[in-house]
Amino acid sequence: MHVSQIVGDQRNNKLFWRLIIAIFAFTRNHANSSENDNEYFTSITGLEALMNTEQTLLIDLKDYVIKAKQQINLLEKEISKIAREHDLASQNLESYLANPVNAYKLIKRLFVDWEVYEEQIAEVINFFKLMDERRKNFQFPQLEDFDESAIALVRLQQTYQLTVPEIAAGKLNGIQYGYDMTWTDCLVLGRQLFHMQAYNQTKFWLKESVKRLQQEPDRLELFPSDFLQEPTEYLIRLGDADTALQLYKIIAKHKEDGRGSFKIKEMIQSSEILPNAANDNENIWKTPYHVSGRLCHIHFSIYGKFQMQKTAEFDIYQKLCRGEMTKTAREQRDLRCFYVYENNGFSRLAPFKVEDLNLDPEVKIFHNILSDETIEIIKQLASPHLARSTVVSREQARAATHNYRISKNSWLAYDSHPSVLRMLRDLHDITGLDMKCSEDLQVANYGLGGHYEPHVDFFPDPSYYPTNLPGVSGNRISTAIFYLSDVEQGGATAFPFLKLAVKPLKGSVLFWYNLHRSLHGDFRTRHGACPVLKGSKWIGNVWTHEGGQELIRPCALHQDHEISLPYEIIK
Ligand SMILES: O=C(O)CCC(=O)C(=O)O
Ligand SMILES: [Fe+2]
């Protein structure tokens, strides 16, 4: 090819973009390689750091694009100049070279100029160096974050029965929140879900991607054909040859290398259809379903290893999360709102507002307990120490992370700030319980899709009672959840056996007894934190133990724990 033909060729532009993609491909590989310390998918607080990282990278990239454009302009001028010389030479090469000036210029070009060009082009590689630097000094997500954020989307989709086109359009529960997802967003998510064997989900997302691609095939030239070839094959293997064909037609129409790169007919003939690909909702979305102290009951697994059904309890829990189930008017008939002032003389002047949510077992909400200022103080004290939440279970001796509890938390000692101590005093003033026997305040933050599946807060087995907490003895008699934020959508605290879902209300406290008066665990108190659909959920947990409460909440004359035993075995 003659040099002058290269001038102005769009291919230069493509090369430039390929280079950028290569840089980002490198970025991802690099990101996968190290330990995941931050687990950004678990809470909103970490995501702010990632936003900051992206802001810096955006400035870097803009800077790079400006410089690269200048560089390309300069190089194009150089190419034109050399091409002119070659045109001239091609008319009569011998006489051209016989001119000592031409001879000098040729030698000088090859000896000096090409080194300059090389240096100019090598500048691009410096971007890698810059990225290395950024990676050392800024926070980046890891593969686990990438996968778990996809799982969170699917969890939300399943819990709140959202459709893929709805989510892709930035709509959650009929409300337009964000921007549309692009065809590439949907495609990448589809590919990711395929690798997790979430085949039914894959189909929906790839279908959505193809629909969006048909409407607006922008940025298509950015990606090589094989980027689209893989999803075409997935669609065929999932039994959706129609969508695969549509995708193939787009590739063939818009990409010069698309037609030759693979043959759709052969692909359809040679690809094996995956068994169960059509109805994987029951078979694929299974995971060990956390039932404390019991054998695993199973519901969705993103990894498809388990084959058990989700429990009726989980079904009710999801209905409660969606707001599809509430107590009947009859069941609510005896619930009251009242003032409490008995336990502290001052509260006669400003009594606490209490609302019954359930009578047996007792579940109540205390209103207007924390001011916004106090909440800010608590969040600020807790934020620097937030770490991934863990769970203690019978199956594992040590507390461990699980995908049935996704949030971050940290612990605050009551003497760390007068506002923290005040929370404990308020709890005493309202409930009359001796609060000295309480674990430190646990502050938790849930990100999007963050949740905690139904569980009990008490320890079913006395060998798990904490022994390392000074002044704390016995089982967890009560739970108090201080709501430190509202949540725009989702994030309720749901009690499947009580047909109760409590929407977080900033400043209020949800309170219940975990134990019967006989101090046996009350399994009817099983509860969970519904996935957060929109917003950032903050809570403060106070778990108070049985030690010292003997005279405050004495046992009754009869055994009262049989009543909750049927609920221990989760159906
Ligand atoms: O976040 C919630 O609503 C419930 C939290 C909870 O149950 C727990 O942390 O044990
Ligand atoms: Fe809990």
Image: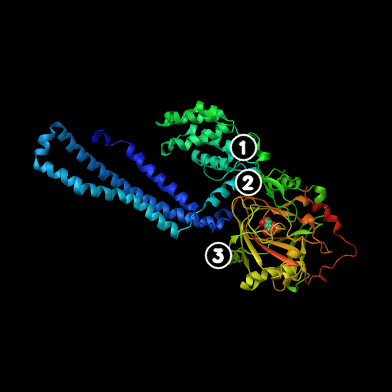
- What is the CA distance from the residue labelled 1 to the residue labelled 2? 14 Å
Between circles 1 and 3, the one closer to the viewer is: 1
- What colour scheme governs how the chains and residues are painted in the rendered image of this protein? rainbow
Q: Return the residue at label 1.
A: 200
Front-most of residues 60 and 335: 60
Circle 2 residues within 10 Å: few <14, some 14–19, many ≥20:
many
- What is the CA distance from the residue labelled 1 to the residue labelled 3? 40 Å
Q: Are the residues tagged 1 and 3 within 8 Å (C-beta)?
A: no
- Is the residue indicated by label 3 positioned so its CB lies within 8 Å of ligand 1? no
Residue 547's x, y, as percent?
77, 71
Q: Which residue ends up furthest to the right in the rendered image?
A: 557
- Is the residue indicated by label 2 positioned so its CB lies within 8 Å of ligand 1? no
Residue 252's x, y, as percent?
44, 29
Q: Residue at x 27, y 36 (%)?
A: 6
The earlier-in-sequence mark between 1 and 2 is 2
Circle 3 residues within 10 Å: few <14, some 14–19, many ≥20:
few
Relative height, residue 285 to residue 38 (above, below)? above
Residue 267's x, y, as percent?
51, 29
Between circles 1 and 2, the one closer to the viewer is: 1
Q: Label 2 is placed on what type of residue?
A: Arg
Q: Return the residue at label 3.
A: 384
Q: Residue at x 88, y 61 (%)?
A: 559
In the picture, residue 237 is in which quadrant?
Answer: top right
Circle 1 residues within 10 Å: few <14, some 14–19, many ≥20:
many
Q: Return the residue at label 2.
A: 155
Q: Give the secondary structure at mark 3.
A: helix
Q: Label 1 is placed on what type of residue?
A: Asn
Q: Residue at x 19, y 45 (%)?
A: 109
